Image (cartoon, rainbow, N blue to C red):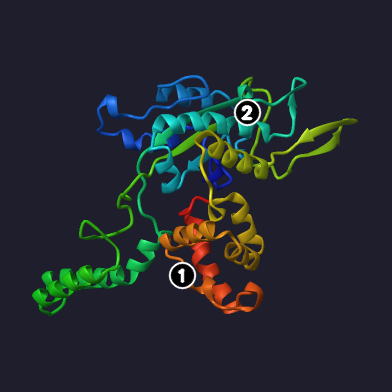
């Protein structure tokens, strides 16, 4: 499960309305009959209108400055293995989302009106999306890129010749284009995979738009707080503050495994991702020490994303990998983590 939390905008001048983001989340519904559309939902309601989502988020921004985000975006990105375990069910994802938001509320280290924050203090709306497209982070795009570059150059030459700007044989260039298209390593139904093409297989994921303010519009609940769960003295009183992202990510992962009886492999776990980022050598040596069946599954999951796991089989003293092998593996797994390909 790959989860991200991002503010409304990455620049310092935030839009005053959530309309643009909400419209973006409606893109998959365009051209679909009502029966096939995915609607917004919250903790207790389904089929919430776009107009209500915009009105509720925009109207819940009391005392926020223009330079402060009005809402945060959370995405829940299950791996294909996780999606297969729930039969790619949108209803299962909705139930899971509602449990995740309970974990989200628990990660806030503060009280509202003397009570610990609960999901009832959180104003959010979520939406299941069923499709994903290839991006520059994907292995298929990266490995097709050399061919894409040559194809683009030849197409530009063809257009220049047809406009009379260059002299050349268009038929020869078109034959070269066909050969390059055939040589590209990654295709779907015979067509070279390009940026923006729909990914095959189950691709469901969840977008959540969560207000910066609580449901009473009085208190700020920011998951972007630079303070981890802690206490500070303010006006002579000890006040709790902060958001514990570690607790949230762990809680969300545990929730999925418990709800759906999912047998999570080490390389799919949040703990593994943290280990990789802090100590890659320990990450790879941990994989080699897994029980036989778990290690085989870890290798299989990594191989599916293009990581050369043969380097983990190098005979070394006490399973200590060479730095050359570590650096090669780091490069591959790092790209996998960036794209969330194995759900970590």
Q: Is residue 156 visible?
A: no
Q: Can residue 276 be seen in this view?
A: yes
In depth, the one of 246 and 111 nearer the eye is: 246
Query: Is 58 left, or right, of 180 in this rendering?
Result: right
Q: Is mark 2 on a helix, strand or loop?
A: strand
In depth, the one of 223 and 185 nearer the eye is: 185
In depth, the one of 310 and 62 nearer the eye is: 310
Residue at the extreme front of the image, as rendered: 292
The span from disc 1 to disc 2 (Cα, nearest Å) is 46 Å
Query: Is the residue under label 2 in contact with that under label 1 (CB below 8 Å)?
Result: no
The residue depicted at 35 percent of the width and 43 percent of the height is 131
Count of numbered labels shown in the rendering:
2
> Which tag is nearer the camera, tag 1 or tag 2?
1
Q: Is mark 1 on a helix, strand or loop?
A: loop
Residue 67 sits above or below residue 333 on the image: above
The residue depicted at 31 percent of the width and 33 percent of the height is 29
Q: Where is residue 147 in the image (x, y as percent from the top left)?
A: 29, 71
The residue depicted at 25 percent of the width and 33 percent of the height is 31
Q: Residue 73 carries which label?
A: none
Q: Residues within 10 Å of mark 2 (few under 14, many from 20)?
A: many
Mark 1 or mark 2, earlier in chain: 2
Q: Where is residue 336 in the image (x, y as percent from the top left)?
A: 48, 59
Query: Is 220 left, or right, of 47 in this rendering?
Result: right
Q: Position of residue 272 (x, y in %)?
A: 60, 55
Disc 2 marks which residue? Answer: 213
The residue depicted at 62 percent of the width and 60 percent of the height is 277
Q: How crowded is mark 1: few (under 14 residues within 10 Å), some or many (20 or more)?
A: some
Quarter of the rendering containing residue 20: top left
Q: Where is residue 34 in the image (x, y as percent from the top left)?
A: 28, 25
Disc 1 marks which residue? Answer: 308
Quarter of the rendering containing residue 86: top left
């Amino acid at each position: 499960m790959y989860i991200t939390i991002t503010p409304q905008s990455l620049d310092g001048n935030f839009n005053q309305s959530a309309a643009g983001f909400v419209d973006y989340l409606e893109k998959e519904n365009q051209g679909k009959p009502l029966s096939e559309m995915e609607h917004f939902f919250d903790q207790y309601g389904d089929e919430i209108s776009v107009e209500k989502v915009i009105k509720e988020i925009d109207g819940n921004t009391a005392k926020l400055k223009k330079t402060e985000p009005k809402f945060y975006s959370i995405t829940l990105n299950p791996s294909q293995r996780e999606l297969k375990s729930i039969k790619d069910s949108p209803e299962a994802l909705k139930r899971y989302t509602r449990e995740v938001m309970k974990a989200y509320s628990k990660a806030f280290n503060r009280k509202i009106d003397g009570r610990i924050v609960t999901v009832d203090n959180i104003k959010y709306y979520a939406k299941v999306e069923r499709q994903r497209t290839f991006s520059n982070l994907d292995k298929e795009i990266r490995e097709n890129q050399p061919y894409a570059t040559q194809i683009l150059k030849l197409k530009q030459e063809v257009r220049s010749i047809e406009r009379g700007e260059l002299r050349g044989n268009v038929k020869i260039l078109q034959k070269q284009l066909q050969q390059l298209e055939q040589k590209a390593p990654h295709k779907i139904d015979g067509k070279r995979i390009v940026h923006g093409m729909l990914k095959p297989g189950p691709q469901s994921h969840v977008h959540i738009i969560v207000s910066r303010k609580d449901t009473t519009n009085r208190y700020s609940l920011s998951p972007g707080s630079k303070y981890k769960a802690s206490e500070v003295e303010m006006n002579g009183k000890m006040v709790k503050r902060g958001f514990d992202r570690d607790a949230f990510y762990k809680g969300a992962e545990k929730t999925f495994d418990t709800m759906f009886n999912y047998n999570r492999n080490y390389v799919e776990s949040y703990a593994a991702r943290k280990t990789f980022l802090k100590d890659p050598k320990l990450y790879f040596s941990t994989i080699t020490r897994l029980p036989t069946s778990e290690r085989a599954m870890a290798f299989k999951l990594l191989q599916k994303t293009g990581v050369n796991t043969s380097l983990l089989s190098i005979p070394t003293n006490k399973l200590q990998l060479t730095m050359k092998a570590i650096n090669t593996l780091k490069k591959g797994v790092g790209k996998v983590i960036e794209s969330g390909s194995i759900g970590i």
